[in-house]
Amino acid sequence: YRMRTRKADFNLELINGNNSSSKNIRNNVTNLRSLENCTIIEGHLKILLMFGAKSGDFQGLSFPKLRVVTDYVLLFRVYGLETLSDLFPNLTVIRGNNLFFNYALVIYEMLQLKEVGLHSLMNITRGAVRIEKNPDLCYLATLDWSMILDSVEDNFIVANKNERECGDVCPGTAQGQTLCTQTTINGHFRGRCWSQTYCQTSKFCLYLSVLPAIQSLDHCLKPHCCGDICHKFTLNSLLRRQMCRNLIRGHNIATTNFSIGVHKKCEELTCEPCAGPCPKACQGNKTIDSVTSAQALRGCTVIEGNMVIKIRGGTNIAAELEASLGQIEVIKGYLSIRRAYALVSLSFLRKLHTIKGEQLEADSYAFYALDNQNLRQLWDWSKHNLTIERGRTFFHFNSKLCMSEIRKLEKITGTKERNQKNDIAARTNGDQASCEMQLLNFTSVKVRYNMIILKWNSFWPSDYRDLLGFMVLYKEAPFKNVTEFDGQDACGSNSWVIADVDPPPRTNQEDPGYLIRSLKPWTQYAIMVRTQLSASDEHQVHGAKSDIIYVRTNASKPSGPLDPISSSNSSSQIILKWKPPTSPNGKITHYRVICHKQEEDSDLYKFDYCLQGMKLPSRTPTHLDSEDEQKWNRTEEPNSGGGCCTCPKTKMEIEKQQKEIAYRKTFEDYLHNVVFESKQSRPRRSVENPEPIGSTHFYSTMSSLQTTTASYKEEEKDDKVVENVFGRESTVISNLQHFTSYKIEIIACNHLTDPGRCSMATYVSARTMPELKADDIPGPVTHEIVNEEPPHVLVKWHEPPSPNGLIILYEVFYRKVGDTEPHSICVSRLSYEKFGGTKLTLLQPGNYSVIVRATSLAGNGSFTGTTYFFMPSRKTR
């Protein structure tokens, strides 16, 4: 199969036409005209962000020459587009040479798309399919992707229109025929089609299209091409006929997937919450000489013996040590740091508050620091407290640890009076450090949503040539507890982002400054500046540094609300819940909820559902079962009170859930990063007057985005409900029509009046519950004897004025008085509209009774009252 498909691809490239590079079509429908002469796109095809488009804009728009896309096809937020059938009627192959996040075909948040409709698509050579969050999209259950892809296990097709809400009708079904290839998926055997007009063709048809017996590729682009290959094509050899039979026979093999569920019984366990982290005592003396040995102490809060740290190398040491040793609060023996060349600070012991000194190093020392060549800081003493209950302190040959740092430890721990003269060597501690630092003050801090502009005082050492420049250090800081050496080690790891700034010219009187770019909106950053000096053998060089300041970037447009769920508890209300955005980019002030009434699918008006073989369409109100709601409300927090603990998930379940969440978020981040491309070229600006960085093509569509709600299906303006929700992530929408489908937009805003500070909408659909007697036929059933040939009775009734959805058909039950079994006829909507009822051809005279009931999308209404009439004999007529 693979070889044959490749051969077909090769032949497709020989079609006369123009090759084109990647196409990125956005903002306006007229930009699609760039596809007019394309036959093969050597790259990707992206069509996206057409917020102002309407369905009429796509009428008559078609690109039949396009046959092959060598990379991927992406469609995202193209409003008004209902099908791709007319747009790309002959798109046959998507190669997937380069993929969009592992996908060759992505259809995401296409709000009005009703069917995919790529009826000529017969092969996706590499990559999977992702079709997600398309609230009106049907004809997905009628597609067999294995006819197009070699493997379907990586496909991701979720959050589209509920299959039960779709009245999918394949070609021929309305006439009681089966024209399309039938296959079995998950135990469902049915015809495969793209729409009510086009059957799905097999990728084998792509191979047939290049057989010598077939003169033109167009043969294989007709509807129903491979629905019955053996009849459509004259094959010249017995081998080809056998291949054809095998293909069709292969499609009829049933394959059923079974999912195995595991039922867990909750054990009778009780939970008692700890006051803070639960204590964990670790016995014995502990030596930390590697990251691995540190990991063995993860979770320990009390060390029952001594701790010796002599770690000399490794990867990401500071972060690993904090993760493993950061919970230690008490060391009952002594703490020794010997030749730990990798350490810059002891801040990784962030909770250590007591060293008891029950055992002492050399029978004297509770804190012992020897020959730590890169140790520069013990703790940030403005935020840390440490008590040494017994024993002295020892500091020798710590060449970068300033004496001021050691004196602070003596004072805070209470060991100053205990220490003896030779315990701390003033000549070998801090002898290679610049310990006398001047203070640099910031003179200007300007903030944007994605940048911070800094200026600080000029600084020049006694010999200006010693100043190599400045270092600007910054990092995200949710809390104001950052220290200079957090996350640093001597092996290159550093939690700070460091930017080098050249010294200003000596003749320039302006203060030095720096523009920090590509920051996150509404995020607090810790920032500091320090000098970078050359070492001199002739004289001591004293530098300067600033205090750590905390600056929050400005607010910006938030990301969309997450995980909306809807349910209906009555015929006029919809209950709505959602979760806040992952990136609020400010303080969420309110949510804007816009509810649009949706008309029933136009296909429901076309078909005669009384015909044999036609599946009766039905709709169901939106319900949220208790299990789904529990999953939605579930948090990972432990049980805070007594009682039965929730059963813990297995490691595999936790990993799978985390992977799914992370993968989905990563995909959405990747999508938005690709879609909202940054402008690359801009003139160079000064620090004083920077141009806003990170402006994207997205902002060129902001005006249309802000008016999207107003222009959304203008004909539905009167059927729109708008509500602002403050202080919560839920609402109840009232005064709605019974058993009606609504499309609901949820928009997060972090400013009360500025529409530019509102997110893109998150969508969810819901249907209200049915009205109890809405499908009952009003008034009596009437009759009229018609003396024509053949003679008949015209039975009439009134249509329910406000049915649940719409009336699909009527059932008429009649019988002659005295008969035990009634006769019934089905009256389609189309037939009712002709006569206002139906004709009963009765051959036998006598008294008859008749009752009628309507069937809507919600089910059957009540029977009418019985109507009696007399059918005279032909002689009396």
Image: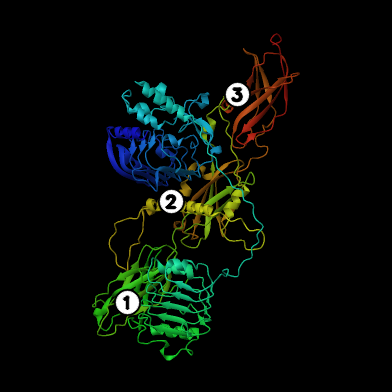
* Residue ID at (52%, 31%): 189
Earlier in the chain: of badge 3 and badge 1, it is 1
Nearer mark to the viewer, of 3 and 1: 1
For numbered disc 1, what is the local secondary structure?
strand
Q: Position of residue 305 (x, y in %)?
A: 52, 76
Earlier in the chain: of badge 1 and badge 2, it is 1
Residue identified by numbered label 1:
531
Label number found at residue 667 = 2
For numbered disc 3, what is the local secondary structure?
helix
Earlier in the chain: of badge 2 and badge 3, it is 2
Left or right of residue 275, residue 345 in this image = left
The amino acid at mark 1 is: Thr
Label number found at residue 140 = none
Residue identified by numbered label 3:
835
Q: Is residue 87 visible?
A: no
Q: Is residue 10 visible?
A: yes
Q: Quadrant of the N terminus?
A: top left
Vertical side of 450 occupied by 108: above or below: above
Residue 785, picture quadrant: top right
Q: Position of residue 549 (x, y in %)?
A: 42, 74
Q: Position of residue 124 (x, y in %)?
A: 38, 38
For numbered disc 2, what is the local secondary structure?
helix
The amino acid at mark 3 is: Phe
Q: Position of residue 61 (x, y in %)?
A: 37, 36
> Residue extending furthest top?
875
